Image (tube, grey):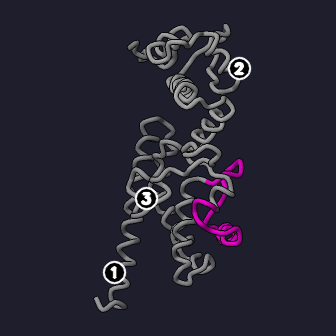
Amino acid sequence: MTAVPSRAYMSIGEVLASLRPDFADVTISKIRFLEAEGLVEPERTPSGYRKFSRDDVARLRYVLAAQRDNYLPLRVIKAHLEAIDRGLEPPATPGGGPQVPRALAIAEGLPGPDAFGREITELRLSREELLDAAAVDPAQLDLLEQYGLVAARPGGFYDGDALVIAKTVAEMSRFGLEPRHLRAFRAAADREVGLVEQVVAPLVRQRNPESRGRAEETARELGSLSVKLHAMLVKSGLKPLLGG
């Protein structure tokens, strides 16, 4: 099997050579057609030559496999790719909608350092998808936004954090707690963020790659530690109530 070159970009000929062992009938014309249909968007050199990234090649493999193995039309494959681009999983059944990744759908436990700023793919949910995945109704979501617990990102999409927050609040509502009762959590989180900013700000102001890397790592570690400390303080504070 022809290996994919290790450099960042490949020519269309190199892409063809890397795909041919698995897709014998692929041609340069086919790759150009898929580009024209908007299924892959390689960059161009100043002289107009196509530059394919590893992600471009992976998309082509997905398209070709979906055509060959599942006989999917291009419009369906394009919808699958759009879902993947938003951090979702393609529909599991024909006619179904995109699915939230299981790891996020069942999100439980405390986030570790990797949960702070190291998302491989940023989830982007529409309002309807968030309502469905979090099992909340429109009125509940309106309240979550009103009290600053959840907010849409630029473009009107909601990220994975919004999903986990909405799911958590929905679970807490079983005990009679409403979004208005949870403003204290928002205020406490803002104060903790302020403390982390005080530590990280001097590194950010240095504006060099090494300092930026240390700032990101420090923010992740402090974020994880603050969540752990908050959880333990709540646990400790509940001991007298529970007879501990």
Q: Helix or strand or loop: what does disc 1 sit on?
A: helix
Three-letter code for the amino acid on which mark 2 is drawn: Ala
Residue at left offset 52%, top offset 83%: 175
The answer to whether marks 1 and 2 mark residues whose Cβ atoms lie closer than 8 Å is: no
Q: Helix or strand or loop: what does disc 3 sit on?
A: helix
Q: Residues within 10 Å of mark 1 (few under 14, many from 20)?
A: few
Q: Separation of disc 1 and disc 2 at Cα?
A: 61 Å
Q: Which residue position is annotated with label 1?
A: 236
Location of residue 86 (image quadrant): top right
The numbered mark at residue 223 is 3
Of labels 3 and 2, earlier in sequence is 2
| The C terminus lies in quadrant | bottom left
Q: Separation of disc 1 and disc 3 at Cα?
A: 20 Å
Q: Is residue 214 above or below residue 229?
A: above
Of labels 1 and 3, earlier in sequence is 3
Three-letter code for the amino acid on which mark 3 is drawn: Gly
Residue at left offset 61%, top offset 31%: 72
Total marks shown come to 3
- State the residue lying farthest toward the left: 244
